[in-house]
Structure formats: structure tokens, C-alpha cells
Image: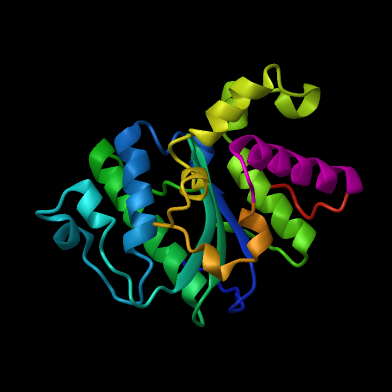
Amino acid sequence: MERKISFVEGKFYHIYNRGVDKRIIFSNKHDYDRFTLLLHVLNTSENLKIRDLLRGKNFNELFKIKRDDPIVAIGAYCLMPNHFHLLLTPLVEGGLSKFMLKLETAYSMYFNIKNKRNGALFQGAFKSQYLDTDEYLKYIYSYIHLNPAKLKDKNWRKYGPKNFDSLREFILNYEYSSVGEYKKNSAIVTAPSNFPEYIKEYKTEKEYLKTMVDDWLNYETEEITQGNPV
């Protein structure tokens, strides 16, 4: 069901959702790739038939499809086994809600057909947080890209990383987030030009991760967090 909330063009939002009953929603590489592809091809005002779109094209070709009329700009994304995070800004009126409706519907249909199941895949309507300050935007950008760290070291936030270099390599090479697009300066799913310059400025990979960790720690220390992300 499409939620009855107004999202303002040019403002920034953290969008997230998890599987119903915290179930796994990405069980293999094909699932992750499918959702990532949907992030790209569904970002349009056109009403596409995914089955027709996929026919006769390989995975890499689909990412070359031009989107002349995107309805949102994606600043960051991260897919985890049972949930996902997106940093979005709507480009047209109603764009964010329309995009999320198309995204969750298309992926749910794919997942249910593949796994021969019925019913809701996600835990209700997607959740949203309005990022009303630069500090909050930096925090969420960092939070999204640091999310995979808990797969490598589940207590890193509480006790600090066991091995910072190893954790850095894991995060910067995590296949199912937008960190690779920033690392390679190659925007495919993301649209960095629609977001403040400061969220993507770094000189080295080591500095990039340290900056993200610092932004996350500084925001937590100041105790100005709004809400509790997944």
C-alpha cells in the first residue's frame, strides 16, 4: 500500500524496510542483483513491464538503459540479508512514494514467484526519516555505508573494530552497497550531483572510511539522533 505522506522535492530522506518477521529477503547474489537492478530501471515516470524489459538482455546491458526522467535521486544504498537502506531525494512531486511502491511491489512479486510463496514480504509500509540538518545527512550517509560492518564484526560499534584494516577492506568491497560507486567515482544507480558535495569528498580509501566512522561517532556523541534506524 502506498503511504499517504508528502515528501518534498529537494529534501533528503532515509528510507528503510525489513522483511516481515525479520525474514531473509536477500538469500543469494541473484536476489541482491535483482533489487539493485530494480533501483536503476524503475527510477522513471514510465510504467514499465519488468518481464518485457528483461527479455533478451544480459545483466550489464540493463544497467546501460538510459533514464531520461528519473523520479528520485539515490544518494546511497545498502542491502543487508533481511533489510535495506536508501538515501533518497524526490525529483518530482510524489516521486519518492511512487518509486518505493514500484520497487517493493516488483521485488516482492519476483521473490514470491521464485520461492513459491504468497503474502507480504516486507514489514508494512517503508519507514522514513527526514534529514533536516547537514550533520544528520552526513550521519545517515555514513550509517548506510557502514551497515555491513556488523556482518564482519558485530560488536564493532560497542567495543571498536577488532581489526580496522580488515573491517575497512570488508566495507569498501561490500558488493551490495553504493560504496563501490563512490570508490570508483562511477555513478550508475546513484546520482551524487543531487546531494551536497561534502558527502562524497575523500582523498584515499583509508581516509574515506575514517571520515564515515568519525561522522557516525560525532553524531552519536552529540546525542542528536532522530529515531532508531533498522
What is the residue that sits farthest to the bottom in this orientation? 93
The image quadrant that residue 147 belongs to is top right
Give left or right: position of 13 versus 123.
right
Against 149, residue 131 (above or below) is below
The image quadrant that residue 66 belongs to is bottom left
Q: Which of 119/224 is in front?
A: 224
Q: Main secondary structure of the magenta part?
A: helix
Q: List x then y, in percent, for residue 58.
A: 17, 48
Screen quadrant of the C terminus = top right
What is the residue that sits farthest to the front in this orientation? 203
The number of numbered badges drawn on the structure is 0
Give left or right: position of 216 versus 116.
right
Give left or right: position of 118 versus 51.
right
Residue 69 within the magenta-colored segment of the rendering: no
Against 61, residue 112 (above or below) is above
What is the residue that sits farthest to the top in this orientation? 162
Q: Residue at x 30, y 76 (%)?
A: 46
Q: Residue at x 77, y 24 (%)?
A: 160
Q: Which residues are magenta?
A: 202-222
